[in-house]
Image: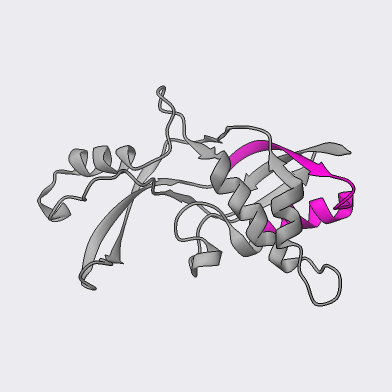
Amino acid sequence: MLQTSRFRIDGLTPLLMNRYMGQQSPKSFELLSPEERLAWARGAAYLTPEGTPYIPNGNFQQCLIAAGGYLKGKGRRNLSRTVAAGVQVAEAELSITSAAPTLFSAMRKNPATGGRMLGYRLMIGVPWTATVSVHWDDELLQSEQVVELLRNAGIRIGIMDWRPEKRGPYGQFRATLL
């Protein structure tokens, strides 16, 4: 039977947003004015038409599936396949409540050339919050496992760009059952 649990998500570290835009980044960010850099970063962020930042359903769903790898299943198996089959995020977009986003810059590796280049992201600073409803199959998981799943997702996996799963320090959160 499908159960629903609602969680409050509190950011522990800032979020870096990087949405695939299907376009090349400017040849040289250094030649852009500060306003142009911020506009480019906003274009690569997850923002509603009103400008409110959000976390896409797919990003959070993949975070939960990856976190299932830290939960022990039967024998030597983990629960990532079980989570993929039995856990769904209800909302299409998780609206983020936070202060105004800022511009973040860091040296990035260009995958095509292997060279280094300056990259810009929109950063959502701490504190940020969101709420999420998670539907889960009680024939596959117990309520304690769902709570542990979200705990692992927040600390070990993270969301958005340069998160712990990708060897970064951003995107960590604490989930509290409501």
- Stretch of the chain drawn in magenta: 127-153
Does 144 appear above or below 176?
below
As drawn, is 76 to the left or to the right of 13? right
Residue at 55%, 35% in the rendered image: 96
Residue at 88%, 53% in the rendered image: 144
Q: Where in the figure is residue 17, as x and y percent of width and height? A: 42, 47
As drawn, is 3 to the left or to the right of 29? right
Q: Where in the figure is residue 158, as x and y percent of width and height? A: 58, 57
Q: Nearer the viewer, residue 35 or 119?
A: 119
As drawn, is 86 to the left or to the right of 108? right
Q: Which residue is outermost to the left?
A: 31
Res 97 → quadrant: top right
Image colouring: one colour
Q: Where in the figure is residue 111, as x and y percent of width and height? A: 28, 67
Residue 149: say if magenta: yes
Residue at 62%, 37% in the rendered image: 130
Does 169 appear above or below 127?
below
Residue 123 visible, this orientation: yes
